[in-house]
Image: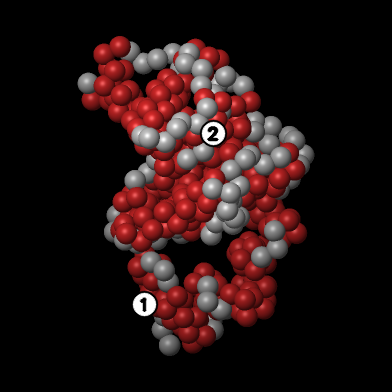
Amino acid sequence: MIEEARTIGITLTAARPQALAALLRYFRDLDLAEEAFQEACLRALKSWPLNGPPRDPAAWLIFVGRNVALDSVRRRAKQTELPPEEAFSDTEDAEAEVAARMDGAHYRDDVLRLLFICCHPELPATQQIALALRIVSGLSVGQIARAFLVSETAMEQRVTRAKARIARAQAGESGVPFEPPGPVERAERLGAVAAMLYLVFNEGYSAAGDQTAAREPLCEEAIRLARLLLRLFPAEPEIMGLAALMLLQYARARARFDAEGAVILLDQQDRTRWNRAMIGEGLALLDKAMRHRRPGAYQVQAAIAALHARAETPGATDWAQIDLLYGTLEILQPSPVVTLNRAVAISKLRGPEAALAMVEPLGDRLGGYFHYHGLRGALLLQLGRTREAREGFMTAISLATTSAEAAHIRSHLDGLKL
């Protein structure tokens, strides 16, 4: 019974984007679509254990949810005349007809519409992420609030404000357009969807210490949605690169912290704890993406992660190739953080003095960045400039965003002798 309930739960989660997106197309009301989907899920939990799961769970949920929503519209209307049936995008009552369309263009367009609405550039990034996790992934407001370390009230307000922007579009006011974008805008917005998913992933991956357990689901959800995008765009190399990057990074999750939550640097990690199945999937996706010969920033980052994943020991890491890849990334996606990361490779290849020469000019732009002062302090320490290293470490501690980061730098300070 428990295993059956778990299987049904997994099926409902997998069907959520497709079913909710179709209901949104039918009724153009996000709250109504959510309510209809939730009611359909409740009915599934009652009927599926008795009658067995349907041939197409998503089609079943759409069919039941649509009828639930139509009943709700009729109840709300009361004395108000209902709009003509044609006002709804599809009012056929045959479940089979719904199922027949699931492999067609509607499926792709529906899910894309849902993702595009959630990550529309008119919505702030914080609202994009919150809305995607609430609407597409189905996480509760409480779960999202705990992951982002804010109160449930604050997160509820964040989601509500985002929904309000969408609702205004339906009323003809300025807001988030409901209709799916055309081919050109679709290509542009696909990049926004990918960026939003990577933001979700990083919110989970950057957690440390006692935050790790609460925020790990963000990584897993980002990977799940990236796989969904891959089904929609099976020939898009940058989406392959994004999925590969997340998989290769998350494969190291169990080795990144010790039992007390302290940070373990890449060179000191127990590589037997890396998830080899996840690494294999990531490497296969990256190889497939590279065959398209259309390089992009996610593919390059995934290639860097792949070099770490393929190295059986820290000493076997191909730092020369990593340096070249970071050089490519500086061209594709110029950023002082990219240059800072490249400096790590330079320190391995040409020593701390050459790396420090790359790091020092970044101070104006990265003066408030924890990792800048941490790396600079480590390089100064290797050069024997102990007093300057101490100052750098102290600044890094003041900028640490987690107790694990601060504890890691403090361990360097404890070993200093002036």
The structure residue drawn at horizontal position 36% and vertical position 61%, both measured from the top left corner, is 154
Height in image: 112 above or below 62?
below
Q: Which mark is residue 331?
A: none
Amino acid bearing label 2: Arg
**How far from the left and from the top, in percent, is residue 290?**
71, 38
The structure residue drawn at horizontal position 61% and vertical position 79%, both measured from the top left corner, is 363
CA distance for labels 1 and 2: 60 Å
Q: Pick whichever, 378 or 19, lies toward us.
A: 19
**How far from the left and from the top, in percent, is residue 352?**
61, 72
Q: Pick whichever, 329 or 96, lies toward us.
A: 96
* Residue 401 in view: yes
* Structural crowding at the residue carrying mark 1, measured as other residues with C-alpha within 10 Å and reported as few (<14), some (14–19) or many (≥20): few
Residue at far right of view? 293
**On the picture, is 299 further left or further right than 154?**
right
**On the picture, is 299 further left or further right than 415?**
right
Q: Which mark is residue 25?
A: 2
Height in image: 199 above or below 95?
below
* Residue 198 in view: no
Quadrant where the C terminus sits is: bottom left
- Secondary element under disc 1, as helix, strand or loop, is helix
Residue at far left of view? 1
The structure residue drawn at horizontal position 58% and vertical position 53%, both measured from the top left corner, is 173
**On the picture, is 305 further left or further right than 413?**
right
Quarter where residue 291 is shown: top right
Amino acid bearing label 1: Asp
**How far from the left and from the top, in percent, is residue 27?**
49, 34
To which residue does mark 1 refer? 414
